[in-house]
Image (spheres, rainbow, N blue to C red):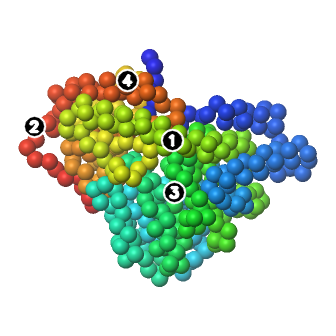
């Protein structure tokens, strides 16, 4: 059975060119880049090249790039660094729709005595910048707002947000894990202090990420030990994956035009085909300002998990817009924050494409999914409800 992979916001396939560049560092070039001998030193040159490639993709300087294990570590490092560098400030501002890498950390910090303000979003997942302005305080240590939402693809106005934050002299962090390689990013034009990215979201391997730290920004290491990363992140470098990340960033920059044209056209073909073929279906998020590869479609009166199960039987891979687990009927925190009605929220599916997605893949899904939805609605316990129950916005 063929696999139709449309879950690229969860992870991507490693580009063959990335794998090819990675393999020598797993085979003959296995030295430690921190070693004094020539054998290790030649490996260090590969790490330096990777740093230059990542920096170029962001418009940064190589010394502003710190290699990490993933986007979560990058996010955690940025937030904790800002707090440790300003121990007198105990307030954090973020949004209700952040990735758990940020939300769970902030909630943990609240238990440790910090205060947090969670900004709301409207029905399209957009922020109110006036609410942001009113949330900033003298004791605000950091503002952490994602570049683009991982579930809906909605893009936030990072430049405008950064200008508001920096006017108050507050540190600003953005989780750009979903945006790097899909949206143009130039940190020379964006007032951000910290920016996180992850290799496996842009056709690199899992287990490697990077954190951009603007020169002059207060920084405290998250991991302490050896002198790696100029003393900013201890631990022997994951050289093969770092080299792969550098190559992936280079290729992402070269393929960005295709992401914003070809991939977007395929996304629109998928979305338009499904909305035309399936009644009572809506798109979650800001359709005018979102990632070019992402559509989150809600199908009324059906459960997302049931849709995924039947799609999987046809070889179609996607994600539920619902974070439901066994024994829980709550939809995702993103859809709750947007106020998506109950009977739609539970049937939300995120399709996320890549440059390896084909028109044949799209047409297969447009052909199969209407039959799946029809079958599920025939047995749905929700379809005869007279009134819709709003999703919890607490």
Reply above or below: 279 against 82.
above
Question: Dot 1: few (<14), some (14–19), or many (≥20) neighbours within 10 Å?
Answer: many
Q: Which mark is residue 364?
A: 4
Question: Can you name the residue that lies furthest to the left here?
Answer: 386
CA gap between label 4 and label 2 equals: 30 Å
Residue positioned 37% across, 23% down in the render? 364
CA gap between label 2 and label 1 equals: 41 Å
CA gap between label 4 and label 1 equals: 21 Å
Residue positioned 44% across, 44% down in the render? 292
Residue positioned 58% across, 41% down in the render? 255
CA gap between label 3 and label 1 equals: 20 Å
The C terminus: image quadrant? bottom left
Sequence-first disc among 2 and 1: 1
Q: Which mark is residue 289?
A: none
Q: Which mark is residue 175?
A: 3
Q: Mark 4 or 1, which is nearer the eye?
A: 1
Sequence-first disc among 4 and 2: 4
User: Residue 363: image x %, image y %?
Assistant: 37, 25
Kindly state the secondary structure of the residue where label 2 is placed.
loop
Q: Which mark is residue 259?
A: 1
Sequence-first disc among 3 and 2: 3
Kindly state the secondary structure of the residue where label 1 is placed.
helix
Viewed as shown, does residue 127 lie left or right of 385? Answer: right
Task: Tell me which corner region of the image, top left, top right, bottom left or bottom right, holds residue 311.
Answer: top left
Reply above or below: 280 against 312.
below
Kindly state the secondary structure of the residue where label 3 is placed.
strand
Question: Dot 3: few (<14), some (14–19), or many (≥20) neighbours within 10 Å?
Answer: many
For disc 2, the marked residue is 384
The N terminus: image quadrant? top left
């Amino acid at each position: 059975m063929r696999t139709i992979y449309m879950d690229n916001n969860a992870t991507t396939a490693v580009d063959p060119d990335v794998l090819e560049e990675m393999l020598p560092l797993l085979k003959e070039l296995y030295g430690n880049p921190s070693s004094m001998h020539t054998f290790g030193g030649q490996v260090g040159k590969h790490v330096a090249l990777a740093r230059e490639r990542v920096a170029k993709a962001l418009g940064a300087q190589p010394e502003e790039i710190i290699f990490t294990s993933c986007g979560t570590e990058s996010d955690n490092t940025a937030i904790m660094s800002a707090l440790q560098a300003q121990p007198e400030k105990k307030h954090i501002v973020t949004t209700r729709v952040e990735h758990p890498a940020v939300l769970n950390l902030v909630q943990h910090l609240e238990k440790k005595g910090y205060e947090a303000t969670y900004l709301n979003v409207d029905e399209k997942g957009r922020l109110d910048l006036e609410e942001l302005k009113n949330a900033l305080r003298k004791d605000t240590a950091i503002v952490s707002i994602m570049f683009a939402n991982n579930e809906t693809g909605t893009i936030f106005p990072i430049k405008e947000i950064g200008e508001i934050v920096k006017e108050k002299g507050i540190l600003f962090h953005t989780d750009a894990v979903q945006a790097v390689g899909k949206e143009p990013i130039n940190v020379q034009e964006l007032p951000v202090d910290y920016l996180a990215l992850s290799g496996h979201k842009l056709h690199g391997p899992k287990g490697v990420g990077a954190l951009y730290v603007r020169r002059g920004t207060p920084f405290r290491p998250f991991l302490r030990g050896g002198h790696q990363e100029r003393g900013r992140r201890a631990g022997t470098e994951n050289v093969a994956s770092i080299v792969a990340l550098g190559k992936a960033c280079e290729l992402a920059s070269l393929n960005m035009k295709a992401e914003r044209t070809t991939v977007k056209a395929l996304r629109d073909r998928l979305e338009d085909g499904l909305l035309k073929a399936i009644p009572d279906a809506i798109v979650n998020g800001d359709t005018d300002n979102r990632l070019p590869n992402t559509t989150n479609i809600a199908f009324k009166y059906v459960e997302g998990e049931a849709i995924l199960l039947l799609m999987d039987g046809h070889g179609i891979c996607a994600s539920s817009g619902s974070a439901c687990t066994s024994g829980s009927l709550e939809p995702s925190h993103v859809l709750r924050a947007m106020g998506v009605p109950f009977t739609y929220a539970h049937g939300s599916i995120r399709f996320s494409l890549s440059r390896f997605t084909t028109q044949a893949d799209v047409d297969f899904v447009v052909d199969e999914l209407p039959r799946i939805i029809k079958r599920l609605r025939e047995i749905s316990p929700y379809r005869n409800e007279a009134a819709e129950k709003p999703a919890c916005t607490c």
